[in-house]
Image (tube, grey):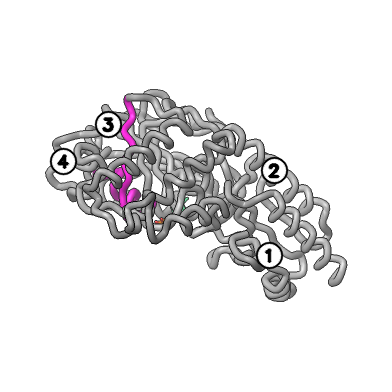
Amino acid sequence: MTSAKPVFNFCSGPAMLPIEVMQQARAELLDFQGTGISVMEMSHRSDIFISILDSAEQNLRKLMSIPDNYRVLFMQGGASLQFSAVPLNLMSAYRRAGYINTGYWSQRAMAEAQRYGAIVELASAQCSNFKTAFAAGEVDIPRQLDYVHYTPNETIDGVAFTEIPDVGDVPLVADMSSCILSASIDVSRFGLLYAGAQKNIGPAGLAVVIVREDLIRPDLPNTPRLLNYHIVSEQVSMANTPPTYAIYLANLVFQWLLRKGGVAQIEQHNIEKAALLYGALDRSKLFYNDVRAQYRSKMNVPFFLREETLTPVFLEEATRFGLLNLQGHRSSGGCRASIYNAMPKAGVMRLIEFLEIFENRYV
Ligand code: PMP
């Protein structure tokens, strides 16, 4: 809930932010800590902004227990620009990378990487119509790959890996846009992680990249400066003017998460919220989710109505009930509830209440 009207926003991204974060941002909007100006109006080279950037990095390191041999980069262009940045930095020795295809976003990543080298599709969930992911040892990894890329949480179809793929010595790259900070992970299992901010971190535009130092190469004359991890890292995320206000808000979200007890605590909330919602869908005679149970996402819960003609009626009535942005992605239709970290349990309970009201009325 972010306004006086009791609404819950289930948008997949830009997603709702924690109410406490919004209130703090409002309180500090015009006068940041007695400076008389907004963070939005400050030089990115000022001591105050540099301390915000540093604090954001340190807080993220703490939340994710990021080892010292990883760099944290704040970049622009969302997750999609990382679809290019990853091959432009990491395709080196073999100019060949492996991609695991679990749906829309892994395909977008793969399509972009194809511009820069050879792409091997290591596994595809297409035969299940993208209703499944893969177990750790299920994907064979050929030799001579610069990296393996996968999407731990497919935002549109609501499919999530339960285990990190076993890729041996090959650097593993993960697009964590819709699951970063939602559950504890062992960063040392990855070569590189990236995420667009607008789901679990902050406002759109910002992307966070966490990359192991030995994968950062200084000799990339053809990689654009702003996509070059070496340059961005050497310039401490200030190769040009960074998205200062987005970084400030991200830091407020990181501080909020730390106050909540960190990622392990929020993970328990996420498990509980998702179990409640899937439970309600599985009990329903009208609504259903068709993702293979073990791979159901705890962040994005797509659902459909057995009586399809009722879908627009449901969406309209849900909006009037204060449940916003429940429409599914344009590519798959139906409905989808995104229940990221900031969604309180009360929002999920309200949705379940409405599912029952609607079903009783129409079935
Ligand atoms: N990857 C995933 C998993 C996503 O969910 C999204 C956005 N929904 C993107 C990439 C693209 O992000 P952006 O719009 O920030 O480029």
From the image, state whether disc 3 or disc 2 is nearer to you: 3
Q: What's the residue type where badge 1 is placed?
A: Pro
**In this figure, which residue is indicated by the disc labeled 4?**
220
Taking the image as drawn, is residue 145 in sight? Answer: no
Mark with earlier residue (3, 2): 3
Q: Which mark is residue 215?
A: 3
Q: Is residue 142 above or below residue 29?
A: above
Q: In the rendered image, which quarter is residue 231 located in?
A: top left
- Give how far across and how far down residue 20 sits, in percent: 56, 51
- Where is mark 1, residue-wise? 6
Question: Is residue 77 on the magenta stretch?
Answer: yes
Residue pictured at 76% horizontal, 60% vertical: 287
The mark nearer the N terminus, 3 or 1, is 1
Question: Are the residues tagged 4 and 1 within 8 Å (C-beta)?
Answer: no
Which quadrant is the N terminus positioned in? bottom right
The label on residue 293 is 2
